[in-house]
Amino acid sequence: MIKVIYPGTFDPITNGHVDIIARAAKLFSQVMVAVAKNPSKGTLVSFDDRIFLTKEALAHLPNVEVIGFDGLLANLVKEQNITAIVRGVRNSIDFEYERQLVDVNAHLANNVETILLTASEKVGYISSTVVREVFLHEGDVGGMVPENVLNYLLSLK
C-alpha cells in the first residue's frame, strides 16, 4: 500500500487541485489531502471552511482522505507514515519553488520522496491566487473551482 500526501492551503480548492488529486488517486492506494492552517497567510476562506469545502469537492474519490494540520509538513509526514509527497506544477516558476521544498522535506522527513505532477492543459492556468483575485474583483470564477466552492464564494457577496 502506497500512502501519499498532497499538502496545500487550498484557499480555496480549485479545479487544478482536484485534477492533481484525482490523478494521484489513480496512481496510489491512499491520498491524504492535508489542508494547512498557515496562519502567516491572510486567507479568504477560514481554516474550518477550507477543510469542509475540500472534503466536499473530493467526496467522489474513495481513496482520498482530507485532514487539517498546523505546523511542519515534515512532522505530519513522519506521524502518518507517508511514503511520498505529491505536488502539482503548472510552469517553470512552480518547478523552481517546488524543487527547493523537495530538498527541505527530504532533509526534515528522513528522505521522503516528492512526486511532481504537471498540471493538465485545461487547468494549468488556475491557481488559488488567480481565483481569489478574480473573485475579489467581481469576475466569474465558474469553471475554475468546484461547484460547492463557487456556491460558497457567491454566498460571501
Image (cartoon, rainbow, N blue to C red):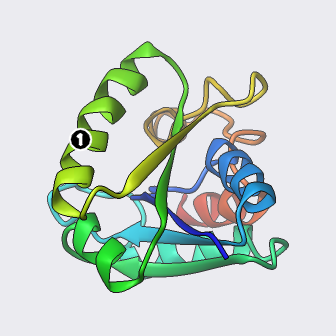
Decide if residue 73 is on the left or right side of residue 22.
Answer: left
Q: Which percent across, then down, holds residue 121? A: 75, 22
In the image, residue 15 sits, relative to residue 84, either above or below, namely above
In the image, residue 150 sits, relative to residue 94, either above or below, namely below
Q: Which percent across, then down, holds residue 135? A: 54, 41
Q: Which percent across, then down, holds residue 107? A: 17, 53
In the image, residue 150 sits, relative to residue 140, either above or below, namely below
The amino acid sitting under disc 1 is Asp
In the image as oriented, which residue stretches furthest toward the top? 92
Name the element at disc 1.
helix
Q: Quadrant of the C terminus?
A: bottom right
Q: Quadrant of the N terminus?
A: bottom right
Taking depth in this image into account, of 151 and 90 the one nearest to the observer is: 90
Which quadrant would residue 2 be assigned to in this image? Answer: bottom right
Residue depicted at x 51% and y 77%: 51
In the image, residue 29 sits, relative to residue 157, either above or below, namely below
Residue on which the image places disc 1: 103
